[in-house]
Image: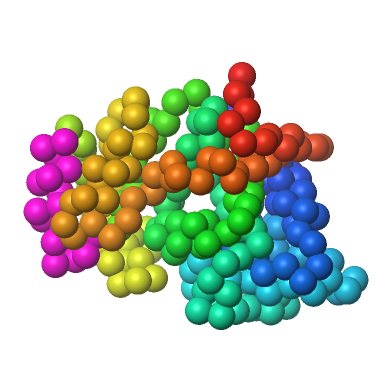
């Protein structure tokens, strides 16, 4: 049975730790999801104490939340290089390769991660896994969804268009596209799969993040503390 209070405490610990790593006058990426929102909560406290920063949100939800927390916002047009980005993940393997996209914001999140000098990934212990095996979210042009699904099936995947939880029909991303969740079982070569998905005509971006491991810091929240793992640490 999942202990929701312990999970929330772990997320808060990770988010607060990431926020405390932010330095004055940084421009930072702000990911989407509950753990990042705890980082925003802590950033609000630090801004009230005198911290000066600007944030680039990765979704409408992140933008709304950041505004509510009083975090000044900017864009990649104004700052194409960011000091760091804070984001969550659905799965993290021992080499810091990620699956992201449960919130359907992975395309913008990948743009922000690519622009950042350092990528701070905040998770609780349940997100750490020996091997990536979760369904991979894939953002797809609606016009091409049927041929894309056929191509994914030919690759051995099991694609399914994501349906809205509180609306009829498919989930629509902030970019106006569909999200396909595609199961591949255990992913033996995440880099190769990410590259293969990127080559499918009609695919905008996948939720596999394999190119940022050298600049990634994983902050794993626990109930009363958190662990900070440097790039390519092996996780037991």
Where residue 140 sits, quadrant-wise, is bottom left
Q: Which of these two is toward me, 55 or 168?
A: 55
Range drawn in magenta:
140-155
Residue furthest top in the image: 236
Q: In which quarter of the image is the C terminus?
A: top right
Can residue 30 be seen here? The reply is no
Above or below residue 34? Residue 169 is: below
Residue furthest right in the image: 49
Above or below residue 27? Residue 5 is: above
Question: Residue at point 53% right, 36% down?
Answer: 96
Q: From the viewer's perspective, is 233 left or right of 24?
A: left
Q: Which of these two is toward me, 65 or 216?
A: 216
Q: From the viewer's perspective, is 133 left or right of 221?
A: left
Above or below residue 188? Residue 155 is: below
Question: Residue at point 18% right, 51% down?
Answer: 200
Above or below residue 28? Residue 50 is: below
x and y, in percent, of residue 53 in the image? 74, 72
Q: Secondary structure of the magenta portion, mostly?
A: helix
Residue 167 located within the stretch drawn in magenta:
no
x and y, in percent, of residue 209 in the image? 44, 45
Can residue 150 be seen here? The reply is yes
Where residue 194 sits, quadrant-wise, is top left
Residue 145 located within the stretch drawn in magenta:
yes
x and y, in percent, of residue 44 in the image? 78, 69
x and y, in percent, of residue 193 in the image? 29, 38
């Amino acid at each position: 049975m999942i202990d929701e209070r312990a999970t929330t405490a772990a997320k808060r610990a990770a988010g607060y730790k990431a926020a405390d790593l932010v330095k004055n006058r940084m421009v930072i990426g702000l990911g989407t999801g509950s753990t990042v929102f705890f980082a925003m909560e802590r950033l609000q406290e630090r801004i009230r104490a005198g911290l000066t920063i600007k944030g680039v949100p990765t979704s409408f939800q992140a933008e709304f939340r950041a505004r509510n927390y009083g975090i000044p916002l900017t864009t990649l047009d104004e700052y194409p290089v960011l000091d760091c980005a804070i984001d969550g993940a659905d799965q993290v393997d021992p080499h810091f390769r990620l699956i992201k996209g449960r919130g359907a914001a992975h395309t913008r999140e990948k743009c922000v991660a690519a622009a950042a000098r350092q990528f701070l990934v905040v998770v609780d212990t349940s997100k750490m896994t020996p091997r990536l095996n979760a369904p991979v979210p894939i953002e797809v042009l609606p016009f091409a969804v049927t041929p894309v699904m056929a191509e994914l099936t030919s690759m051995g995947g099991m694609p399914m268009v994501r349906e809205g939880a509180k609306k009829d029909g498919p989930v629509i991303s902030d970019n106006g596209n569909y999200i396909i969740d595609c199961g591949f079982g255990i992913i033996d070569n995440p880099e190769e799969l990410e590259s293969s998905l990127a080559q499918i005509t009609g695919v905008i971006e996948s939720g596999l993040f394999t190119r940022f491991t050298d600049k990634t810091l994983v902050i794993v929240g626990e109930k009363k503390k958190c662990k900070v793992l440097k790039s390519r640490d092996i996780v037991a």
